[in-house]
Amino acid sequence: MSLVENYNPLADPIYQVMDENGMVNEALRPAGLTDDLLLQMYEEMVLTRMADDKVNKLQRQGRMGTYPSMQGQEACQIPIAHNLKKEDWVAPAFRELGIMMMCGVPLVDIYRYWGGFESGSKMPKGVNVLPVSIPVGSQLLHAVGIAWGLKLQKKSGVTVPFFSDGATSTGDFHSALNFAGVYRTATVFLCQNNQYAISTPRAAQTASRTLAEKALAYGFNGIQVDGNDVMAMYAVTKDAIEYARGGGGPVLIEAVTFRQGPHTSSDDPKKYVPAGEREMWMKKDPIARLQKYLQTKNLWSEDLQKEIDVRGAATVEKAVAEYEATPSVQIDELFDYVHAELTPDLAEQKAALQKALYK
Amino acid sequence: MVEALNLALKQEMKKDPSVLLIGEDVGIDGGVFRVSDGLINQFGKERVIDTPLSESGIIGAGIGLALSGMKPICEIQFSGFIYSGLEQLISHAARMRWRSRGRFTCPMVIRAPNGGGVKALEHHSEAMEAIFGAIQGLKVVMPATPYDAKGLLISAIRDPDPVLFLEPMRVYRAFREEVPEEEYTIPIGKAAVVNEGSDVTVVTWGAMRWLCEKVISAHGDKASIELIDLRTISPMDFETILASVQKTGRCVIVQEGSQSFGVAAEISARLMEKCLLNLQAPVERVTSPDVPPPYLRGEMLTLPSEERIWRAIEKVLNF
């Protein structure tokens, strides 16, 4: 019996492999989760945090648009990428820089999107990542539909929609999980319970004890996992994806984490996050936690950190330079993708706008 | 019209294995209007699929099906129930090509019975095509005859982008018309000049076409009326309207839906922009008033009638 099948969301404690001090329950550590892989994921999480923080800095300098930082949610997004195959699909919400980058979306395109260039949402060929979806909860149905379509076409592929606790209150969350249950789609719902939907805390969002247990009502299982524990996230997503790929049906993962930053760059969480709550969560930080483990294994040193930081900074700076060299938005780009072909009305409006703007 | 639509679905499903039909009661029941009658027997329950009762779910999952390489035809039982699916329609189906710069597309058809005049319950008689026509990236088609229904539905299924296909309920079984057995298409975005005339242009679409034809039968001796059936709401074939009004100098627009912010207003504004000096009279609209569609006892009070249409024609002729 697989880990996700075995878990009882109504009774079992939150699934954890590595505690806040980096102490590991080796019995739960999955095969394949080597120290080398952990070291790799450590560097990927550090890079994610640097890339994310860079947007915040650029935003404050007026070089970026409004941005929803994902700081603190790195362990929800990096490990799962190692368990996905090329045939799988990801349907992100908007706080998903980490998983998007890991699945092959160029960092420069992520920057372009948040910087206000439509070209940022053109995913490279072969990268099965849908563009950012801002209406909360709406992308879950797309992931279910894709998995359903693959199943009907006898193709394999698991779909993973990303969303947060707020999305579980939407009608589309209900419809998506319901459709997934009825058609047994290979969908792994990844809910990052980051405790807040803008200012509304998780407790005000639903009377359910956990979000994971909601899966039971749709005829499949859910599992609550420590979303700041990179080992637990690796183990649970590996198991859930294999289970779905093998025809077991959908799984709901509730990754319990914390949004360390504001909702977006336009928000101030000091207004609504009670004193001490953030500090409490900072002690559970996913990157610091993995670093503690690596230290106990003598796999981390200040010198290594410097190397990682230098490599990360180079990657980020290269993306920033490319982003800042993005050509200005052209009228063509705005009209040419509305339909497969320009309609007579659009052709006329485009010509009129070009004339008005450029004479 | 029901049989014509059924035939179109059957032929396209036979021709293209990626076409599938999803919706509430579309399987064994054949849809509440029987448009998909018998299709489940021919194509099986993996291609004619009864879904849970969720319009947002049908359209949202339909988007995913399209992204996966299939061509879903989503049936919404009545257009008055589509509103919970509007977010999926507006924010995703109609925008996926644009958002992804052509990398992801949503070739899908959303079919829905539309309009009143059949003594149905509340929410079953809506004619809100103006709302849908305002959605960027969405094509909105509304056939008025069985022949057009078949040809336009085949075009909609083959279209590379999402098409909202509104079927006038009042015409479903109103009369019989021979429809060719073989496949044919009618281009989306092309209106039909149904009756040629020189005194006044009447523009209409959907079930209202039949009232206008009756007006022509009754009053054709008094005025030479050119009748245009729009057939596609968006993208609109304004060229055909313009050519006609430049000839006649007068225009009456007959719209089943309520008056303000409608398709008729759009046509009227364009006539002002393009042929003000050709106009011999102000453009006249015959529409329902801006009230919710009345229940079955009162619905005929608000819907455009032959008499109101003729009076509007007389008004522009005598201006």
Image (cartoon, coloured by chain):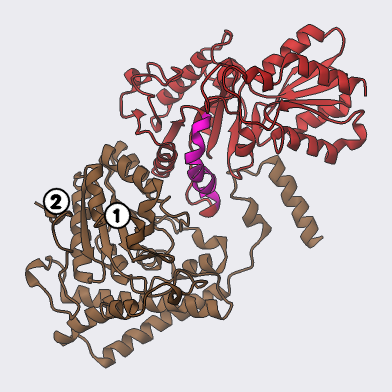
Chain colours: A brown, B red
Give me the disc on residue A5.
Answer: 2
Q: Residue furthest left?
A: A27
Give me the disc on residue A235.
Answer: none
Q: Nearer the viewer, residue B298 or A6?
A: B298
- Return the chain for callout 2: A
Position of residue A212 relative to residue B237, above or below, is below
- Return the chain for callout 1: A
In whole angstroms, how far apart are the C-alphas of marks 2 and 1?
Answer: 24 Å
Image location of residue A252, percent across then percent down: 26, 53
Magenta-colored stretch includes residue B97: yes
Image location of residue A305, percent across then percent down: 29, 88
- What residue is shown at x 21% (from left), y 75% (from top)? A38
The quarter of the displayed image where residue B222 is located: top right
Query: Closer to the N terminus: mark 2 or mark 1?
Result: 2
The residue identified by callout 1 is A207
For the record, the magenta segment spans B79-98
Find numbered disc 1 in the image and state the secondary structure of the residue it sits on.
loop
